[in-house]
Amino acid sequence: MTAETEPPPKPELEIAEALDEVHFVPVREIRGVIAALGLETTWQLAREAQAIHAGTGMLVADGSRKRTLGGCFFELARRALSPADRWRIFELPRQRQLEKRQQRKAKRSERTLSPAAESAGASPPTTEPAAPAQWIAELRHVPTGRSSDASAPRILQVARPFLETYSSEREALEAGRKALTTALEKLYGSRLKGIVPPRIDVRAARQ
C-alpha cells in the first residue's frame, strides 16, 4: 500500500508567499490574475515586482511612500490587465463587500429603532455608507543583530493568522499588537525576556 502523497501547493499560494502576502484578499486577487493572464505571465510579474522592490522601489499614487512588494506586483498586474479584468478582479469584490457591510449596518439600525419611535411614525435613522476596509496590520521583521532575531520567523508564523483587514489605521494597529501578544505568550510564556518582537507596520490594503 503506497502512502498518500500531499496535493501540490496551489499556484496562487506559492506566488502569494513569494510576495509576502498572507491575507485572503490578496490571495484571491492573485488567483484572478492567474486566470486572466496565465500562470507564466503572473510569475513574470511577481519576479519583476521583486526586482523593483529590491531596487529603486515604486511609489504609491500620491507619492507619499514606496509600495510594499505585494503592492508593486498588484500595480504591475493592473497595468497588464484589461479594464474588464481589473473591474472583475479588484473592484467588483470590494463593491460587493461594501454593499454587504451597508446592509448589515442598516439592519442594525433598524433593530435599534425604539418601539415608541415606530408608533410615532418615525423613519429609521439614515445610515452613512460604510467605509471600505483599507488598512492592514502587517508584522515585519527588522533584524536587530541580537540573538533573538532567530525567533522572529516563528513569531511571524504564529501571529499572522490573527491579522485581518480593518476599516481604520487604529484598528489595524490594535490588531497587530494583539496578534504579537498572543503569539509571544503562546510561544514563550514567561520566558519573554530578551525577545525582540517583529515590528508592526500599518499599510493601505491593496495599494
Image (tube, rainbow, N blue to C red):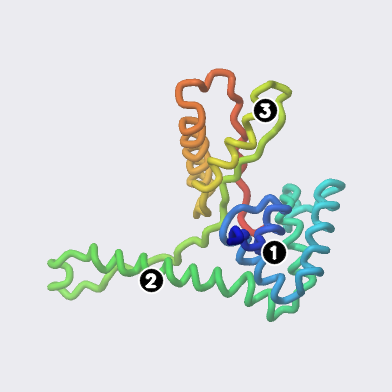
The 10 Å Cα crowd at callout 2, few under 14, some 14 to 19, many 20 or more, is some
Q: Is residue 49 left or right of residue 99?
A: right
Disc 1 or disc 3, which is closer to the eye? 1
Residue 6 rendering spot, x and y as whole percentages: 61, 59
Q: In this view of the protein, which residue sits in the foreground, 51 or 11?
A: 11
Give the residue displayed 68% in from the left and 50% down from the top: 20
Q: Mark 1 falls on what kind of element?
A: helix
Label located before the other in sequence (3 or 2): 2
Label located before the other in sequence (2 or 1): 1
Residue highlighted by disc 3: 149
Assign the N terminus to one quadrant of the image: bottom right
Residue highlighted by disc 2: 103
Q: How many marks?
A: 3
Q: Is residue 57 left or right of residue 153?
A: right
The furthest residue to the bottom:
84
Dot 3 amino acid type = Asp
Numbered mark located on residue 11 in the image:
1
From this view, report whether residue 47 is shown above or below residue 172: below
